[in-house]
Image (cartoon, rainbow, N blue to C red):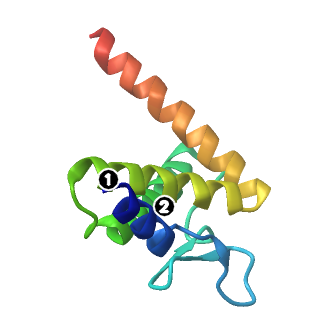
Amino acid sequence: MRIVLMSALAAVTLVLAPAGASAEAWRVGDAYVVRSAAADLAHPEGRAALSADIDRAAQRLCRSVSPRRARVACVDEARAAAVAAAPSFARAAIAQARREQGGQLSARLER
């Protein structure tokens, strides 16, 4: 199982590399592109949208990984690799989105 997981992670690791001339678009694996230009990163909604786009792309890339535990690990690693490879403005926006989402979750749990 460990070899299968390592192979799957190597095959589907999320890579944010320039997808063309634009510094605001990155490749996600071989099949998906995340575009930060579509999101207004100055607002919480835009930051959340960028973070959600990266999450969706990672989930799509890892959807065929089995069992579930391996798929979750694949998504986590793919997302971490994507954030690490992103330019600093995108990393900052994604980190802020996670803090904002965490605050919303905490507020919901306190109710």
Residue that lies at the very extreme toward the top in this rendered image: 110
Please rate how many residues cluster around mark 2, counting C-alpha atoms within 10 Å: few if below 14, some from 14 to 19, many from 20. many
Element marked by disc 2: helix
Query: Dot 1: within a 10 Å radius of its alpha carbon, few (fewer than 14), some, or many (20 or more) residues?
Result: some
Whether residue 25 is situated above or below residue 8 in the rendered picture: below
Percent position (x, y) of residue 69? 27, 47
Foreground pick, 65 / 98: 65
Dividing the picture into quadrants, the one containing residue 81 is bottom right
Q: CA distance from mark 2 to mark 1?
A: 19 Å
Foreground pick, 45 / 26? 26
Q: Nearer the viewer, residue 8 or 94?
A: 8
The three-letter amino acid code for the residue at tag 1 is Ala
Q: Residue furthest left?
A: 67
Mark 1 element type: helix
State whether residue 40 appears in this view.
no
Task: Give the residue drawn at x 47%, y 56%.
Answer: 49
Look at 55% across and 42% down and name the residue there: 97
Residue 47 is at least partly visible in this image = yes
> Any mark on residue 54, and which?
2
Identify the residue at horizontal 44%, vertical 84% (top origin): 31
- Give the left or right position of residue 29, taking residue 5 as reference: right
Seen in the picture, residue 50 relative to 29 is either above or below; the reply is above
Would you place residue 108 above or below residue 96 in this image?
above
The circle drawn on residue 70 is 1
- The percent coordinates of residue 62 (x first, y second) are 34, 66
**Amino acid on which the number 2 mark rests in the picture:** Ile
Give the x, y percent position of residue 95: 62, 41
| Dot 2 or dot 1, earlier in sequence | 2
8 in relation to 96, above or below = below
The residue located at (75%, 89%) in the rendering is: 21
Labels in figure, total: 2
State which quadrant residue 36 falls in.
bottom right
